[in-house]
Image (cartoon, rainbow, N blue to C red):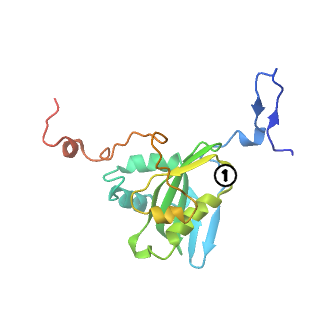
């Protein structure tokens, strides 16, 4: 098999070496994919993203309330992005934060309310999971408080095991400092 990793002997410095073709992945040079379903499409081409639309939605979401546009742009630049379109109008978005080798985190998943409830969110997540990179990752994760049934239908399972998944959560990080600190004046 010409693209499989080569095992080295115990005496070699490196136990496993990956093929050269898999070493130069970056978010800027990943292949662009498109899926179509009637008048709907999911596309990974960042040049087609409606950044204002994405920022507007995220800045009003419960998970990224008040996020600034610069942070949204920075997050998109460093992620594999999937946009959902109805004809040429963007109506949904998700992004995958990944090392392109072992791990991916799916986040910022949304479909605008007028297109929810018809299976488009599930289809967009299915497209994320069908992206060629995803089938070779050891762990794919996401965090949700609102739509567990959507992710369960695409193969995700709740971890809910004590002392397995840990994190630092800052739910108010994008809100203005005054709103977070109340009326406290910083000097």
Give the percent coordinates (x, y) of residue 44. 59, 59
Residue found at x 51% / y 61%: 151
Give whichever of 30, 141 is nearer the camera: 141
Q: Is residue 119 above or below residue 69?
A: below
Residue found at x 39% / y 61%: 146
Q: Is residue 51 left or right of residue 19?
A: left
Residue 81: quadrant of the picture: bottom right
Residue 9: quadrant of the picture: top right
Residue found at x 29% / y 46%: 172
Viewer can see residue 43: no
Which residue sits furthest bottom? Answer: 38
Residue found at x 45% / y 61%: 148
Q: Is residue 44 left or right of residue 53?
A: right
Q: Is residue 112 above or below residue 11?
A: below
Disc 1 target residue: 133
Q: Secondary structure at mark 1?
A: helix
Give the percent coordinates (x, y) of residue 121. 50, 67
Q: Which quarter of the rendered picture does the C terminus lie within? A: top left
Q: Is residue 65 above or below residue 154?
A: above
Which residue sits furthest right? Answer: 1
Q: Residues within 10 Å of mark 1 (few under 14, many from 20)?
A: some
Give the percent coordinates (x, y) of residue 79. 54, 49
Viewer can see residue 56: yes
Give the percent coordinates (x, y) of residue 17. 77, 33
């Amino acid at each position: 098999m010409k693209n499989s990793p080569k095992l080295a002997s115990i005496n070699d410095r490196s136990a496993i070496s990956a093929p050269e073709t898999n070493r130069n992945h970056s978010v800027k040079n990943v292949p662009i994919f498109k899926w179509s379903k009637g008048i709907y499409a999911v596309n990974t081409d960042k040049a087609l993203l409606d950044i204002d639309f994405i920022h507007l939605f995220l800045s009003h979401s419960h998970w990224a309330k008040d996020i600034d546009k610069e942070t949204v742009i920075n997050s998109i630049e460093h992620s594999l992005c999937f946009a959902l379109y109805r004809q040429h109008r963007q109506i949904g978005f998700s992004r995958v934060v990944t090392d392109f080798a072992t791990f991916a985190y799916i986040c910022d998943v949304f479909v605008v309310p007028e297109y929810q409830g018809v299976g488009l969110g599930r289809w967009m997540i299915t497209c994320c999971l069908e992206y060629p990179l995803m089938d070779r990752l050891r762990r794919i994760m996401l965090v949700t408080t609102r739509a567990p049934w959507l992710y369960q239908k695409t193969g995700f399972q709740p971890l809910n095991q004590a002392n397995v998944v840990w994190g630092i959560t800052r739910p108010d990080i994008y809100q203005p400092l005054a709103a977070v600190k109340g009326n406290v004046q910083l000097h």
